[in-house]
Image (tube, rainbow, N blue to C red):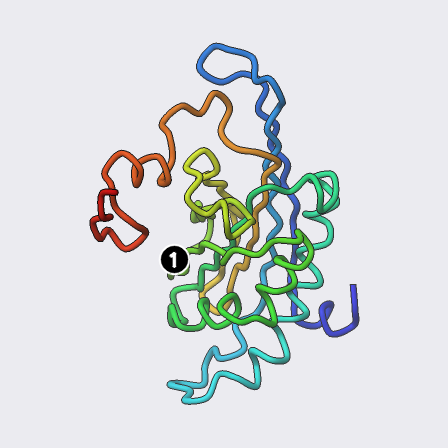
Amino acid sequence: MTENAKRLVRKSIVSIEDTFIEGGRAASVPLRMVVGAAVVHNPWAGQGFVDDLRPEIHALAPILGDLIVPPVIAAAGGRDAVVTYGKAAVVGVDGEVEHASALIHTLRFGNILRDGAEGSSFLPFTNLRAGPGFALSIPMKHKMKEQEGSRAHFLTATVSIPDAPAPDEILVAVAVATGGRPHHRIGDRYQDMRDLGVDQTGARLEQV
């Protein structure tokens, strides 16, 4: 950890969940979901309404990405093993939801995960305000843009830290998974489009 990270980050965690059986049946390939999170002091705490959040975003978001992402990718088995990803943040009750959003909705953070996983799709997310011990949900989807409609890869991981976020803190998290849901069988967006005869916008396709 860099000296800057040591000064700003109170704690970090990596959590691994392996699913071997789902619906009473063994998964053909076990599904691994990995969550990485960091608890950081809210840099805007106690300042009232701040018009320009960019200086702190530029300073802190890359540090958080560099701290959280590499161990998550490694725990999943490397970038080739990562199939889905997502991000989330929760700000303590003395902060604004905008403060949580600020640290994850920037390419200075998101691109570290996207590049680390060699993905091309946008990162699904949650951002909200809550107190210590809150169970933060991290939605995930397929990392490749051309597979964004694959419902098999719509997954959710959770992270909860008993003493975070404090009122003047932000908890930032990312999640990855090594595949889709075991025994997925609800089809996908592309099949629905073919069945309904519509395009990505929902407009009716001309019959030929």
Residue 77: image location, x then y, percent: 74, 38
Say which quarter of the image contains residue 58.
bottom right
* Vertical placement of residue 29 versus 74, above or below: above
Say which quarter of the image contains residue 187.
top left
Question: Which residue bears the numbered disc 1?
Answer: 130
Residue displayed at 54% across by 59% down:
172
Residue 124: image location, x then y, percent: 45, 54
Other-residue count near label 1 (Cα within 10 Å), few / some / many at <14 / 14–19 / ≥20: many
Left or right of 149 on screen, residue 72: right
Residue in the foreground of this view, choosing between 65 and 6: 65
> Which secondary structure lies at badge 1?
loop
Q: Please state the total of marks drawn on the protein image.
A: 1
Residue found at the far front of this picture: 208
Residue displayed at 49% across by 80% down:
44
Left or right of 134 on screen, residue 197: left
Q: Quadrant of the C terminus?
A: top left
Residue displayed at 62% across by 49% down:
36
* Vertical placement of residue 58 versus 148, above or below: below
Left or right of 203 on screen, residue 2: right
Residue in the foreground of this view, choosing between 157 and 188: 188
Residue displayed at 41% across by 71% down:
95
Hey, what amino acid is under mark 1? Ala
Left or right of 56 on screen, residue 1: right
Residue 200: image location, x then y, percent: 32, 52
